[in-house]
Amino acid sequence: MKEEFTITLQGKHYVLLAGLLDEAHRQGLGSIDTELLQLPKDGNGQVAIAKARVEMGDGRTFTGIGDASPTNVSKQGAPHIIRMAETRAKARALKDAVNVGVTAFEERSDGDESPPMQSISLEDTTKRKGQRSETEPTANAQEGKDTKRSSQKAHKIQIDLLKTLAQELTKNGVERLENRIGKPLSELSRAEAGEWISRLSPDEEGG
């Protein structure tokens, strides 16, 4: 799996769906089909359930089930429960297809894995992370790659992820985040982007 498709948040490793798709194509992906098994309704707690079937070029098939409900997606994701369930089903099927055991980032907030994203505000992130300066990379964000990563522009995957996290946290999240950082997201280095991804993601212990 390419490095730009993996992230580490609070010491836990995640792989992005984009990376799973990239690896699947590299290994000879044949097709991906999805099926909606359950529509979200009042009678089932607004839980959507989807099934994904991945077929590789050599004929091997893999399936995955994904669920989504207002209790395990962000506030902003609640109107898109069906799409979230489908995305999670794809991620789980693709993980089996390419033999990846790491949790997909798109699976986060399932069950008790992490607290709801909307419970965190942009203003809280600096306080929760120990009042670090806003663009100062941490040791965890760099880990042996300080010089190289600090001089490289943030990868598009990192920028897209930051936008998603900011939008999940608050209205006009991207604009507010850029104002807080003091520059456009496109001007962040890889180390800075990694630092902000970590800040905007929920703590494993819910703090």
Image (tube, rainbow, N blue to C red):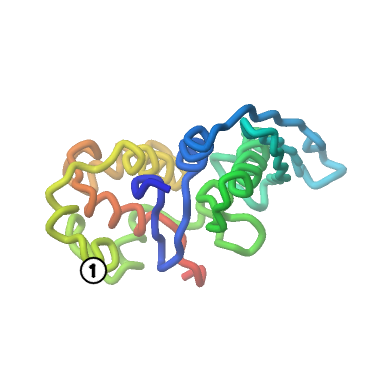
Residue 79 visible: no
Q: Nearer the viewer, residue 206 or 88?
A: 88
Relative placement, left or right, of 42 versus 137 is right
Amino acid type, mark 1? Ala
> Residue 90 location, x and y as percent?
63, 39
Q: Secondary structure at mark 1?
A: helix
Q: Number of marks in the image?
A: 1
The relative height of residue 8 versus residue 169 in the rendered view (above or below) is: below
Q: Could you tell whether 144 is left or right of 81 in the image?
A: left
Q: Residue at x 64, y 34 (%)?
A: 58
Q: Is residue 49 or residue 55 the one in the foreground?
A: 55
**Residue occupied by mark 1:** 139
Can you say whether 144 is above or below 191 in the image? below
**Identity of the residue drawn at 54% across and 40% down:** 76
Q: Position of residue 147 (x, y in %)?
A: 12, 58
Residue at the far front: name it.
58
Percent position of residue 72, x then y: 64, 52
Q: Residue at x 48, y 40 (%)?
A: 23
Residue 120, picture quadrant: bottom left
Residue at the extreme right of the image, as rendered? 43
Q: Hey, which quadrant is residue 174 in on the image?
A: top left
Q: Residues within 10 Å of mark 1 (few under 14, many from 20)?
A: few
* Residue drawn at x 67%, y 42% as measured from the top left: 89
Q: Residue 10, how many percent across, how many down?
A: 41, 66
Residue 191 visible in rendering: yes
